[in-house]
Amino acid sequence: MITNQVPNSELEKLIEAARQEPGRALEQEFYSAREFHTADMRSVFRKQWLLAGHVSSIPERGQYFLFDIDKESIIIVRENEDCVNAFYNVCRHRGSRVCLEKEGRRKLLTCPYHAWTYGLDGMLKAARLMPEGFKKEEYGLHACHIRLFEGLIFINLSNGTLPDFDEAYRSMLPLARQQGLATAKIAFKQSYPTKANWKLVAENFMECYHCQPAHPEYCVVHPQDQVLAFGAGPGSGSDEAAAAYQPTLDLWEAESSTMGYLNDTIDAGVFSLGMQQAVRYPINPQKGFLSETIDGSPACKKLMGDFRQADGGETALAFNPFSYVLASNDFAVMFRWTPRDEMNTDVEVTWLVHEDAEENVDYDPRNVVHVWDTTLKQDKKITEDNQSGVCSESYQPGPYSTQEARNVVFKQWYLDQLELLL
């Protein structure tokens, strides 16, 4: 059973019914029922590698931040120059949270309840007045799986077989490395807490059918033919729109290649770990845009990674439906959404720039964040309105448009993950 209330037989019926209409959205229960949230945590979020943050947020020994998802809190802490650790934020004494602030710096991790004290390696250092025979070495913090990928920190909550990180993301490494993510630094961070189910947040990001009515600023930056072709990544638009845009893409790729830059398209498909994709494409070659800013001019004087001359391209890395990086030549944007419950999702966004870039000298933070800050505020509004409508008794799943092809793939992938629980 998934919970005490939803037997496997009922879940099987709901999945089968959803599979019968692949071109339509999911039924209401998938977006609102507590039981499905519990199933999602087990079938999806405890199996995926989750983008938690960037190493530049914890450059010094003892610096940490918390990654919160559903009922879990994970301490991500720098032990030394070469090691970043992740631990469940649960004292091994009676279960209190050890770290209460979202971020900080500690020489030791001391529980505020009874002062059990742990090293940055998670091992228990001190526990007062314990009985004879108590063995400190048996009561270290529970470790959480962690991997670093070009400066990006990923964690995994799996209790069983751990999915192979390298196998899943190896092919994306060259594009990420070219972008210089490993040596970047944080320019700005912003939260957009959204009162909606995580799947509505994810589905919104995987289609650009809504872009023209909902995102006028975004559509100033990105031309209509591109939005129609793959506004939300490869496979998000129709084949006809993609074919019509291909000559523009080919011309830009040829020019970019003469500058020595790698351009590639990777699509792992519906049967992969997380539908991972990686691609480079032009922002707006018709208008000569060099960055994803409102006027197309670079937002930062220092270009990132291997870029010595702006080619007007954007690198898109989709690790799974809730972990993304979008990067111009001069700055990058990290996106992650994590569920707090069945109808609340944390949307956390981080902007990165070259490690040597100086604020208000090499870049104006307002220019760096403007396009996506505006777009994400609009996304928050439309997604919350979407959730309100889905909760109505009159809601019935409608058909996807030709610009929501990626949502069709996501629906199949998601149902496949649920079936693995049965």
Image: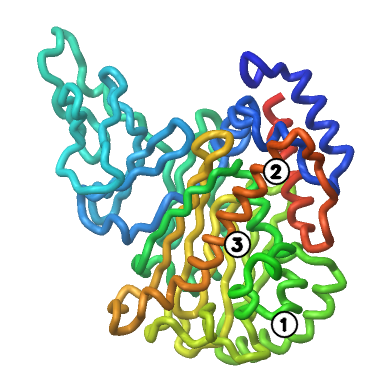
Query: Based on the displayed image, in which of its 4 quarters is residue 119 positioned?
Result: top left
Circle 3/circle 2 CB separation < 8 Å: no
Q: Is residue 191 above or below residue 366?
A: above
Residue 18: percent from left, percent from top: 82, 36
Q: Give above or below for 28 relative to 275.
A: above
Residue type, label 1: Leu
N-term mark: 2 or 1: 1
126 displayed left or right of 64:
left
**The C terminus - image quarter:** top right
Q: Position of residue 144 (x, y in %)?
A: 40, 36
Residue at 61% from the left image edge and 38% from the top image edge = 44
Give the camera-side residue of 58 and 208.
208
Per the image, the residue denoted by label 3 is: 171
Q: Secondary structure at mark 3?
A: helix
Q: Quadrant of the N terminus?
A: top right
CA distance for labels 2 and 1: 38 Å
Packing grade of label 3 (10 A; few <14, some 14-19, many >=20) is some
Q: Where is mark 1, residue-wise?
A: 249
Kindly report which numbered mark, 3 or 1, lies closer to the viewer in this rendering.
1
The alpha-carbon separation of the residues under discs 3 and 1 comes to 21 Å
* Residue at image mark 2: 389
Q: Amino acid at mark 2?
A: Gly
Indicate whether 101 appears above or below 333: above
Is residue 8 in view?
yes
